[in-house]
Amino acid sequence: MSEAIAPGASQDFYFNPWDKNFRANPYPHYKPLLAGPPRILDLFGPTAMVTRYADVMAVLRDHAHFSSVRPRDPAEPPNEGPFAGARTMLFSDPPTHTRLRRLVSRDFTPRRLRELEPRIREIAKNLIDPAERKGELEVMSGFANALPVMVIAEMLGVPPDHYEQFKHWSDTVVSGENTLPGTPLPEEFHTATKALRSYFAEEIERRRKNPGTDLISALVAAHDDDEAMNADELLAFVLLLLLAGNETTTNLIGNGMLALGRNPTQMNLLRQSPELMARAIEEILRYDPPVQSTIRFTKEDTILGGTELPANLGCFIILAAANRDPAQFEDPDRFDITREPRDHFAFGEGIHFCIGAPLARMEGAIAIGAMLERFPRLRLKDPAMKPAYKGSYFLRGLESLPLAID
């Protein structure tokens, strides 16, 4: 598997997102790519590797030349993903992207987030209580997996006690990203995709008959009033919110607690100075972001950072590499919650900047703050642990993270 895209003898880097050892720690492999202009390698087809901060910024701010829409290949089979080919904010360009984003932006306003904050704190407290009785905290299964999906479920207006089923479906769909190109997707991927689509199609139909004050009802109303969002787009957006919204925040919490656990001086500093939480969240996002990369496609022949890129070329925009570019961040491999904040790419940039970024920041701060406040001796159960990561390169998240609390 890894030999298929291993570098040639003349190359000084290795890039293989299907290699679990690579996914466990991709950061050393980014350094050679940061040393020069974008390179093109054969990643089951020519692919540009965009890593330097300035180059990533240029691409993400230039949707006129770098599209989020994959060029259609007539030889490809019908779309097998959860969105079934429907347009979403993530994989569209203006004017479609502009229309879809405008429709949902009202549900992510500062006022709406302030209304959510007390409930998020309540959920966090309720999730921590069982850990105190057990004498240890398994961050992922006992906390990080649950909180974001419960918040999203309540926003959508569906029962929060379904979160375990949602999370199972979500993890299964995301793990499908680790399927080697040219290899059929596993049967469990199709099963989870079908279940998710069926569940939310029924929820949408319920809101059409009996609307409420939740996000699905608001989107149904927008669809029914003026056809601003068609039925396929509506279902796709609800699924995008569940998949992207809960997975990324789950990974923010897990990656953040791992970084703090590996740097106990920083953890103690944050515990003693909770006013540093906002900076700590930004440093977590920069240091080990929940989204490693995104993809763009050149619309025409262009030059980026001195490299000639032909039209219709796929580009790996490695956000996590840019976040450790020494040209932008001093001593970038050091985890430092007192670091002077500088713009990172954990939430993207340009027109596709994550609409849920303020919610993710709030949930991360509440979750990490609640754990540190409740458990003064919180630490890694095994400081020498080699964490296992879930099967997705793009969405970087831990399978488990056991912490001692006594």
Image: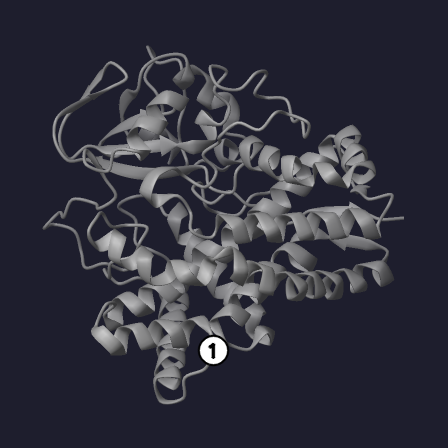
- Circle 1 residue: 213
Dividing the picture into quadrants, the one containing residue 127 is bottom right
Q: Is residue 136 above or below residue 60?
A: below
Quadrant occupied by the N terminus: top left
Q: Residue furthest right?
A: 406
Q: Position of residue 2 (x, y in %)?
A: 39, 32
Q: Residues within 10 Å of mark 1 (few under 14, many from 20)?
A: few
Q: Is residue 70 above or below residue 233?
A: above
Q: Residue furthest top?
A: 10
Q: Residue furthest left?
A: 74
Type of amino acid at the residue the image marks with label 1? Thr
Q: Secondary structure at mark 1?
A: loop
- Identity of the residue drawn at 25% across and 33% down: 62
> Is residue 170 shown left or right of residue 239?
right
- Identity of the residue drawn at 31% across and 69% down: 234
Dividing the picture into quadrants, the one containing residue 208 is bottom left
Q: Nearer the viewer, residue 34 or 275?
A: 275
* Residue 385 can be seen in this image: no
Dividing the picture into quadrants, the one containing residue 135 is bottom right
Q: Position of residue 178 (x, y in %)?
A: 40, 46
Q: Position of residue 382 (x, y in %)?
A: 77, 39
* Residue 273 can be seen in this image: yes
> Is residue 256 shown left or right of residue 59?
right
Q: Nearer the viewer, residue 216 or 403?
A: 216
Q: Nearer the viewer, residue 187 or 146?
A: 146
Q: Is residue 10 above or below residue 213?
A: above
- Identity of the residue drawn at 72% across and 32% down: 262
- Identity of the residue drawn at 19% across and 51% down: 95
Q: Position of residue 143 (x, y in %)?
A: 68, 57
